[in-house]
Image (spheres, rainbow, N blue to C red):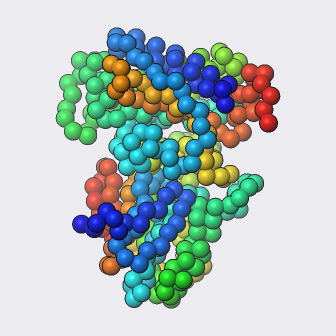
Amino acid sequence: MIEESTVVKVGMADLNVCRSGSIRTTGLGSCVGLTLYDPVAKVAGMAHVMLPSSEIAREGARNIAKYADTAIPELIRRMTIEGAKLVRLEAKMAGGAQMFAFHSSNDMMRIGPRNVESCKQALQLQGIPLLAEDTGGNYGRTIELSCESGMLNIRSVQKGVKEL
Amino acid sequence: MDVLKEVGNIGAGNAATALSRLMNVPVDMAVPNVRLMPFECIADEVGGPEQVVIAIYFRVEGEVPSHLFFMFELEAAKMLLARLSSLQMEDGVDFSEMEISALGEIGNILAGSYLSSLADFTKLYMSPTVPQLAIDMAGAVLNYGLLQYGEMGDSALLIDTKFLQDGNEVQGTFFLIPDPDSFSKIFAALGVPYE
């Protein structure tokens, strides 16, 4: 078990990087937890993506960690500062659930799958391979990425623990 | 803010009365809180983003679209069921189909009394969708109510009320998260200037 003190936390619509211990985000619903890892430099990064695209942002200050299309470039930038190389990065992701099943015209209701799609597009744009994913379903997840091994640990209430 | 608090007060007051009648025990409620809260802090109201809760969710349609959540801790939900019915409780996290259906119905009654008093008070049309039930992490469930706010900022305005029974035990929490565009309508309906 990894010591609590070395866990870097990532909030909702937030991103962070770490070089030791692990990095974690809790309570992913329709949000996507996207992780990047450089296995050589052992730099890990994680973004808690809430919305698919910054184009739908309304007025006001933008939090670039919130949108798939802006969070991923920012995460890469932050990881590069810590010594990671773009060509070595590999991605994993989890989340993007549809917590409630509504047959509604409201596009917001399908936000989980849309978050997953646009994360994939953003990764493709950067040429980063997606090694594994645990997305969709109708349940919440908490994820933790180990800096040492790049292993992604996924916990959920209904499905228990999984490692990718 | 005071106006919204009053709105919450009226709705939750009626819901508490309904709950009290259902269970045949006195149910108190705390004074509603109205706050613009960072996303991060909202789940802390029910024990943190990883706290497993039973959430009954309604999308409120009509003139003031909102999200309405009613959340119980698992223990509280079991107790509620035990008091309410002669259903035999099984231990553990699992709820039978019957129990889930009963909880959905309880949610329906509470949401109905919450919303109808709000509608009476504001003269605005509000209608809840069929309840959706989730037993999951509070953070994951609440995600849903925050998306509209996510387009604008990192905080959401919520009206939350805690139900208490036997003095201090928290039994459940109501979250009303009106869509960002709904405020001006609530204020206008109540004749209060809104800037």
Pinpoint residue A66: horizontal percent, then vertical percent.
59, 61
Pinpoint residue B162: horizontal percent, then vertical percent.
45, 28
Which quarter shows the N terminus of chain B? top right
Pinpoint residue B104: horizontal percent, then vertical percent.
41, 28
From the viewer's side, name the closer residue of B128 and A6: A6
From the viewer's side, name the closer residue of A47 and B107: A47
Horizontal side, residue B165 vs residue B193: left or right: left
Q: How many marks?
A: 0
Q: Is residue A108 visible?
A: no
Tell me which residue sits at (75%, 23%) in the image. Answer: B189
Q: Is residue A4 above or below residue B87?
A: below
Q: Is residue B27 above or below residue A151?
A: above
Tell me which residue sits at (51%, 50%) in the image. Answer: B40
Tell me which residue sits at (58%, 18%) in the image. Answer: B10
Q: Furthest-front residue in view?
A: A5
Q: Is residue A151 visible?
A: yes
When asked about the image quadrant of residue A21, the answer is: bottom left
When asked about the image quadrant of residue B122, the answer is: top right
Which quarter shows the C terminus of chain B? top right
Horizontal side, residue A64 vs residue B29: left or right: right
Q: Is residue A117 above or below residue B105?
A: below
Horizontal side, residue B6 vs residue A49: left or right: right
Pinpoint residue B163: horizontal percent, then vertical percent.
43, 24
From the viewer's side, name the closer residue of A88 and A79: A79
